[in-house]
Image (tube, helix red, strand yellow):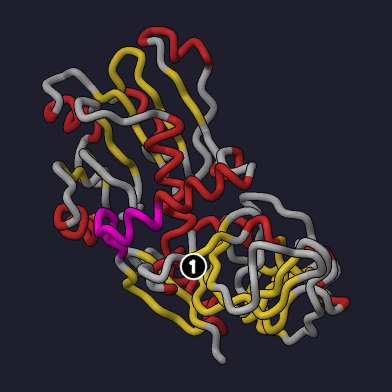
Amino acid sequence: MVLKWEDVEIGEPKEGKIRVKNKAIGVNFIDVYFRKGVYQAEMPFTPDQGLLSGTGYRTGLFQIRYDTVGYDTISGTVYGMEAVGVVTAIGPGLTGIKVGDIVAYAGNQMGSYAEESILPASVAVPVPPSVDYKVAASVMLKGMTAYVLLWQCFKLVALALYFVSGQRPWVPRSLELFQVKRAAQAAEDGCHHVIIYTKEDLVAKVNEITSGKGVNVVYDSVGRDTFQGSLACLMSRGYMISFGRSSGRPDPIPMSDLAPKSLFVGRPGLFHYTTTREELLEAAGEVFANVASGVLRVRINHTYALSDAARVHADLEARKTSGSIVLMPDS
């Protein structure tokens, strides 16, 4: 499946909706998951379910689907999970938001790979003037995910031992697994111990660092390649929190395998923790406050034109990127 650049007419926002001209668009590996069908979305998936009839986006990226008889068919799916933009129109009866406001949105609907979007006003949050719009676009989805992982799924305290398995430089860490090219960056960002899991024995290294005690919690975004090792690194009553599968879906495990150490395993989704307006504002507010104060340092290492999103996906899958990626609309 490939991405194609298309022009479509955009309409006016209806009741409860706003139109946003995107200024910067965040890129996440979950975009690749949806494009490849690892995660399923309705086909076609467009906010308002009316993109091709003129009520969705202008100049978005569409998936081209090849059917079994060899014909190319436009599915109408627009990818992308987060962006920051300026409100250009509001639907009838809306209050608390106005034309000219800078807002961010993330996760509650796909479709940010576009110059202009129509979306529910309830999913848009105000961006503080102290936060650069490119930074906000690159960090909202990732930052809220980190907030949920660290404060909702397992509330970290000073004495907790944990590690993060994966390539997510936005997650605070004590032990983290990185490829060689990211190891130096992880250390620079404050990682106490860097384990290159493709070169070292993960379980042995964690046992060495923790004097055989193991860790209270593991955050694993790699999936198949590290899942069993991550479980083995846990101490009694430890928490295994899976939040990605960049190496593939982990193999199923019998519940009885958790019994010897009374382990807990979870697969949380951000959107279950931001279902209400209050929850969304709290999570986004925490992220933006920590960015503004300098607690969160955001690395935007790659900027592409929106029309080059297909190349971005290729680079992501080839592991040619690190840090945050931002797409900039062409006009």
Q: Which residues are magenta?
A: 287-298
- Residue occupying image coordinates x 32% and y 54%: 290
Is residue 167 toward the left or the right of residue 133 in the image? left
Please identify the residue farthest to the bottom as the structure is shown.
Answer: 331
Q: Position of residue 238 (x, y in %)?
A: 35, 19
Above or below 167: residue 243: above
Is residue 61 toward the left or the right of residue 268 in the image? right
Q: Position of residue 251 (x, y in %)?
A: 51, 31
Residue 61 figure quarter:
bottom right
- Residue occupying image coordinates x 84% and y 79%: 54
Q: Position of residue 250 (x, y in %)?
A: 49, 35
* Quadrant of the frame with the N terminus: bottom right
Q: Is residue 130 magenta?
A: no
Number of marks present in the image shown: 1
- Residue occupying image coordinates x 36% and y 68%: 130
Which residue position is annotated with label 1?
A: 26
